[in-house]
Amino acid sequence: MSAQIDPDVVDFTVLAAWMDEQGLPGGPFEDVEPLSGGTQNVLVRFRRGGRSYVLRRGPEHLRARTNDVLRREARVLTALDGSDVPAPRVIAACPDEQVMNGAVFYLMTPVEGFNATTVLPEPHASDPKIRHEMGLSAARALASLGAVDHEAAGLADFGRPDGFLERQVGRWTSELESYSALDGYPGPEIPGLERVAGWLEDNRPSSWRPGIMHGDYHLANLMYGFDGPRVAAIVDWEMCTIGDPLLDLGWLLATWPDDADGGAAIAGPLGTAGGLPSPAELVAAYAERPEASAGRDLGSIDWYTVLACFKLGIVLEGTHARACAGKASRDTGDLLHAITLGLFGRAERVIGL
């Protein structure tokens, strides 16, 4: 073994026995390497019996819903097997938390690629044409997910699509109101909050087609291939559900690099390098996939973009509220509050307020 992993987190003796039961190749564990990711979940890459794996489990100190989230991730990724959605493929999953120190885990295929919000290698860094195509590839990868028939994939019971759009504003308004229970939080100081909420309620699309949602679709959750502009994998499926896939497209647009609100800097090296397609080009790239766009009103994409700004802004404000209560870093809270203000500013620009 080339790296030491806390046996309370990943017990390789237990893992070896479980893998043997699954009929996977045996032998010693080689090239063991912890991976960093966008979440607190544990990722460990290794080889065994001539095959490469990545193990994913919850953080060392499991949160209340961590195991359920991991079960959902594994189920969705398994359902995507056979599709052309660029995502890690599940090799084997252990939904039984009693096997490994209370943690659900699964083994998936490794992804050979890079996160463009943290590093931008060559030739991507010096070729604006490649960066432009990287943006279009993000929209096309999302369209491949929108093209999947969730019922045919065995996910008919995976979410609650009925009333999905109708409950969004109320659901997230209640979430924001709940932060006031935190001592030290003065309440939301978010210009445009009521105007944006009212506009969303007044302009909700009248019809939509349910499908698989990633739930947190933005550049930081994409891995790009080293050989060009293609998306090698969509990662971090913690928020996946059955809902309106156009909200994923709205989420991409809401977080798309934009110098007007600091979005370019937040997107890291790729945002700073520039050369990316416009939001209109992203929507057009998504629309190229008829199975994704059929029955979905891309003419209402501004509504989904504004909803994404509204929802994400409220989620990030939660950390600001916890920081005010001394339960999170004040610097992080201030940063995320600034991003929230930027998101609501973007929402108002999209609306034209």
Image (cartoon, helix red, strand yellow):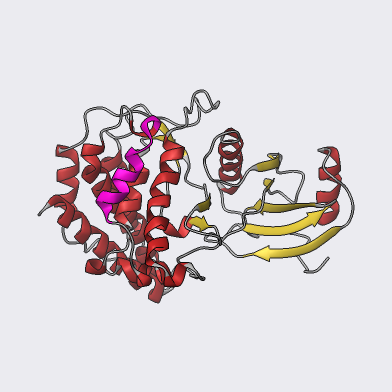
Which percent across, then down, holds residue 288?
35, 38
Residue 174 appears in view:
no
Q: Residue at x 34, y 54 (%)?
A: 312
- Outermost residue on the bottom side: it is 331
Tell me: 71 left or right of 187: right
Which percent across, then down, holds residue 26?
88, 48
Quadrant in which residue 219 is drawn: bottom left
Nearer the observer, 201 or 284: 284
Nearer the observer, 258 or 102: 258
Magenta stretch: helix, strand or loop mostly: helix
Q: Which residue is drawn at 48% across and 55% down?
A: 222
Quadrant in which residue 170 is drawn: top left
Q: Which quarter of the image is occupied by the N terminus?
A: bottom right
Which percent across, then down, holds residue 245?
37, 38
Looking at the rendered structure, the number of numbered marks drawn on it comes to: 0
Nearer the observer, 307 or 289: 289
* Vertical order, 77 against 278 (above or below): above
Which percent across, then down, holds residue 21?
85, 38
**Segment colored magenta:** 278-291
Residue 197 in the magenta stretch? The answer is no
Residue 287 in the magenta stretch? The answer is yes
